[in-house]
Image (tube, rainbow, N blue to C red):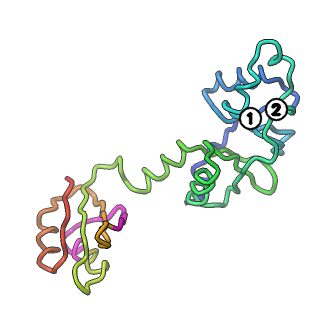
Amino acid sequence: MRIKHWMIKDVVTISPDATVEDAIQLMKKHSIRHLPVTEEDRLVGLVTESSIRQYALPAVMDKLPIREVMIINPVTIDSEATIDEAAKLIYRYKIGGLPVTHEGRLVGIITVTDLLEAFIELMGILRSSSRIDVVPGGESSFEEVLDIIRSHGGRIISVGMDVHASGKKIYYVRLEKCPLEPIAAALEMAGHEVVSLVE
C-alpha cells in the first residue's frame, strides 16, 4: 500500500514569512495540527500545534515570522514509500504526521489518522465479517488451515498473527461474514486448535 493512495493531497501550507498568529488561525480554520512551510512548492520547514504553542503569546505572535520558529529539515517520506514505512517513522520519531515529498516537492501529508484508516481498511475491520482464531496443530502448516477454511466456503479478508506466552503461534483469520461452526469442526478434525470464533 503506497503512501500516495492514502495521503492528503490538498495540503494547507504556510509561507515562512507569515506570522505565528497566521499559522494558529490557519490551523484553527482547517482543524489541522501540522502545517508544512513552503516556498513555491518546495518544503522548507514544518510547524505543528505543539511546536508553536510556546510562541502563542499576544505580545509576539502577530510579529514573529514562521521562519524563526519552524522545524527545519522535518522528517518526511516519499510518495512512493509504503504505509508500513510511514508507520515506522511516525512511531520512531513520536510524531503525529509526515510531509510527503516527491523529487523535493511537497505533494501531500500523511497523519496518524490516515495510517489508522489504511490499516483498518487493510484488516477489513469495518466490513461485515467473522473471525476464527487458530493454532495450527502438529506438523501441519498454516497453509493447510487456509486450505480448509477456503474449502468450506470461507473467503479470507486478512490474517494476523501473535505468539502466545507458551510459544504457540495464534493466527487471527478474518473472513467475509459466514457460518464458522462447520469450518471450526473441520479444522479440529484435522488436528488444529480453534481458540475462538467471532461472528
Q: Indicate which disc residue 154 carries.
A: none
**Residue 150 on the magenta span:** yes
Q: Which residue is drawn at 12% across and 63% down?
A: 181
Q: In the image, residue 86 lies at what x, y percent? A: 61, 55
* Marks 1/2: CA–CA distance: 8 Å
Q: Do the residues labelled 1 and 2 touch (CB within 8 Å)?
A: yes
Q: Indicate which disc residue 69 carries.
A: 2
Q: Is mark 2 on a helix, strand or loop?
A: loop
Left or right: where does residue 113 sit relative to residue 81? left
> How dense is the environment of label 2, judged by Cα within 10 Å: few (below 14), some, or many (20 and up)?
some
Q: Which residue is drawn at 25% across and 76% down?
A: 136
Q: Residue at x 81, y 44 (%)?
A: 43
User: Callout 2, which amino acid?
Assistant: Val
Q: Which residue is drawn at 26% across and 80% down?
A: 144
Report the label total. Answer: 2
Q: Is mark 1 on a helix, strand or loop?
A: strand
Left or right: where does residue 191 sit relative to residue 133? left
Q: Name the residue under label 1.
A: 47
Point out the frontmost of discs 1 and 2.
2
Q: In the image, residue 21 lies at what x, y percent? A: 77, 19
Q: Compared to 178, does 111 lie above or below?
A: above
**Residue 51, quarter of the rendered image:** top right
Left or right: where does residue 158 sit relative to residue 107? left
User: Callout 1, which amino acid?
Assistant: Val
Circle nearer the N terminus (1, 2)? 1
Q: Which stretch appears magenta? A: 148-163
Q: In the image, residue 63 lies at what x, y percent? A: 87, 18
> How dense is the environment of label 1, judged by Cα within 10 Å: few (below 14), some, or many (20 and up)?
many
**Residue 163, quarter of the rendered image:** bottom left
